[in-house]
Each structure stands twice: as structure tokens, then as C-alpha cells.
Amino acid sequence: MKIQAVKGTVDILPEDVGLWQFIETKTRELFHCYGFGEIRTPIFEKTQLFVRGVGEGTDIVSKEMYSFEDKGDKSLTLRPELTASVVRAYLQNGFSVNDPFQKFYYIGPMFRRERPQAGRQRQFHQIGVEVLGTKESGSDVEVIALAFRFFESIGLGDVKLVINSVGDPKSRENYIALLKEALEKDKGKLCKDCHVRLEKNVLRVLDCKVAECQPVIEKAPQILDHIDSESVKHFEQVQAGLDQLKVPYTVNPRLVRGLDYYTRTVFELSHPALGAQDAIGAGGRYDNLIGNMGGPKELGATGFALGIERILLALKAKKCGDVKPVLPFVYFVSLGEEAWKQNFDWLFQLRDHGVPVEMEMGNKSLKSQMRSADKSGAQFAVILGSEDLEKEEIPVKELKTGEETKVAMYKIKETLLAKFEDNK
């Protein structure tokens, strides 16, 4: 029996990798322009990091994490998200003391044991940023604008942005109590998952997409009516900043983030090409996470995460971001051992000059090699036999037109390099 890939994981094949690299390249170009430096943290961390950072009552911690015991009987977890890991690295490496204001970005895989669906696997990939060491509204505006500009840069300028504020911890706590009281009255009209959320993390009820829950959610209290005055001022500043930058947005008072660490600004980006599950990125402010993880309590932070698989689906649906595969420019065809040796030498000489070239490594017929040359997509074929070696004139064939010219053997490398430069 053949061994299959683990459920919820997929192979990223060569024909797809070009689009991944396109996204990664655009990320690095734009994020560096905004002053962010790349950070790479371990794939697994101590389980307690995510319990404390993400929140014990979240679905991520209670249902979805891949946790295991190592040989030292310590519980480790494949990272389900990266904010907690970045904050851990920020504290462990002394940034909070020596240079508190930091701007990091990351690209990499995360792991959650969710039901696999389009654009979301159990191993999935995210692009994200974290701005650490500040509570200023300007940083919220910067990360939101960066997310929006990123989508514009890859051809997805029609993303929809919604924003909200969940207030400071005290007003959020008061709102949660009020929300729970209101939802308890209509508990019988909520789905089974919302019954669990009502007990463990009531804000997650507002995220529910089940149709039967919507009438209850619609009449529930809105958090914007219950946040503190400083959070109101902060949210007004965020909106003013986005208006100044002409970043289009909608205020959605039902938007909350299910993770425990969010405070004040929260936002979500969606794309219509993704259908019902249209979220393509989200983020917000988390002013208490650094303090909760043992760092200075006065240091705030903000950031976002974007789903690469979701981005790929949107790009393919819009037929934008197409990346041409790298095809060989020249295909060497060899007739006989001596011809093969000469072609093999030219093969690496041209590669050393950055020219993509290819040839058969085995002894195959002329017909078979020409079929491979046509299939490869190469523009030219160098067809070398023993007679050509003796005459020191080499046939160079343009595969698209069939036109063939003879090139002096000592000029073959120079000629092919010139043709390559002309075709750039």
C-alpha cells in the first residue's frame, strides 16, 4: 500500500512554487520598504507559551493544537500562530529592555487540527507583522495600511477591510458579562458550538456563521457602545489616519477577534472571490500580551496575519499574479559519446553565466532527444554529432520556426550568450 500525505497537508509542486515565490518576493520588497525586519522562530514551542499567549478558552488551544511530549516529559506544540512566538523571542533576546520599539515580519507554516477546507489545511502558511513596544494609534494605521497596500501590490486591490474596537481590558470584561447575560436568554436558539463558546469564550459567538445564530447575534449588545473613553479616542484616531491615507474601510461593531490578547483596534480583510469563507487576513492591537508573558506591562503591540493559501485562491480566481515558469533557453542534443562530452562541458559553462540550459543525461536516440527538447519549451537546440565535431561547425536550431544555422565551434558559447541577452 502506498503511503499518502497526512490529512490536511498538501504538496506544493514545482508548477505552483512560482506563485508562492511571487507572493514572498512582493512581501519582502514592500515590508522592507515599511521598515520591517524578517524574524524566523522555531516551528515548535513549549505548550504553555500558547496557553498563556493565545488563551486557554480559545478553540485553538482547547481543540486544534498539535501537542506532544518530548523525552524530558515536557509538553511541546507545533506553532498554531506566530504572535506568541514573536513576543517570546522579543523578550528572550532582550529587545524589551535594550530597544523596545521593534517591527518584525514573518513568512512560514502554522499547524492546527481543523477540518480541511479550501484555502485552509492543517499545515497552512501565513505572512504576518508585529509592531512591538508602542501603544500609539499611528502604528495601528501603519499595519492596516501595509496590509491593504500589500494586496494592491499583488493585484488584489478589491479586498474589503472592516475595523472595530474591543476597548481596554476592563471595558471588554464588562462587555463580556453583558453579552453573556443577553445571549443566555436566547441560548436555546444558538447552535451547539455556540453553547460551548458561551461558557468558554463568549466573544466567539459573534464570529459564528451558522444561520440559526444570526438573529440572536444581531440583537446582542454592541461592544462599541460599551468601550472606555480612551479607547473611543484611540479608535477615532485610527479612522482619521486611514481616511488621511485614503484606505477604504467599514466599521463593523460585531467584529471581534477570538484570541484573548486583543485590545482596542481589531480588523479583518476579506475577498469576494473566496465565497462564504472569504477572510483572507486579520489582526489588531494586543497591549497586554507582552506584560502577560513576563515583560514590561507598559509596552503595547499591534500586528496582522494573512493566509497565503487564501491569497493563492483569490489570485487564481482573478487570474492575476501569474508567474511564467523558468524554461531552458537551449537544449543540447548529443549523437555519440564525444558529442555528449562536449555538450556536457558547454552545459555547465552556460549555466555558470546564468543561462538556463538542459540536456539528456543518458544515451537516447535523436528522435527521443528532439522530442524532449520540444517538450522542454527551449527556444534553441544545439544538435551535435561526430561529423559536426570534425567540421567544427555546429547546427543551432530555433525550435519554434525550425530555422537552422551553422555556428563555428569556437563561437558557440559566445553566440548562445548573445542570443540569451537579446531575448531578456
Image (cartoon, rainbow, N blue to C red):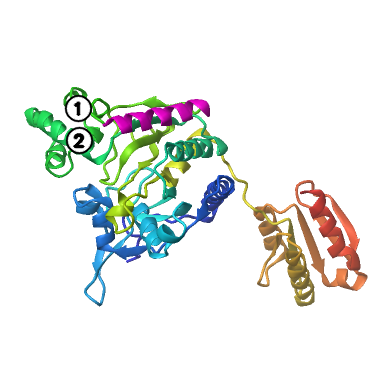
Amino acid found under the numbered disc labelled 1? Ile
Answer above or below: position of 328 versus 301: below
99 vs 183, nearest the viewer? 99
Q: How many circles with numbers are drawn on the protein? A: 2
Q: Secondary structure at mark 2?
A: helix
Q: Which residues are magenta?
A: 228-245
Label 2: which residue?
205
Visible in this render: residue 246?
Answer: no
Label 2: how many residues lie within 10 Å, few (<14), some (14-19) or many (20+)? Answer: many
Near-viewer residue (384 or 422): 422
Residue 267 position, x and y percent, is 37, 35
- Quarter of the figure with the N terminus: bottom left
Q: Residue at x 25, y 77 (%)?
A: 71
Q: Earlier in the sequence, mark 1 or mark 2?
A: 2
Q: Which percent across, then down, holds residue 126?
A: 42, 49
Visible residue check, residue 187: yes
Q: In what element is the residue under mark 1? A: helix
The answer to whether residue 89 is magenta is: no
Q: Quadrant of residue 78?
A: bottom left
Circles 1 and 2: CB atoms closer than 8 Å: yes
Residue visible at 40% across and 58% down? Answer: 96
Q: Relative to residue 34, is residue 224 depicted above or below? A: above
Residue at image position (8%, 32%) is 184
Q: What residue does disc 1 label?
A: 217
Query: Of the residues shown, which amino acid type is indicated by label 2?
Result: Val
- Tell me residue 302's x, y (percent): 39, 44
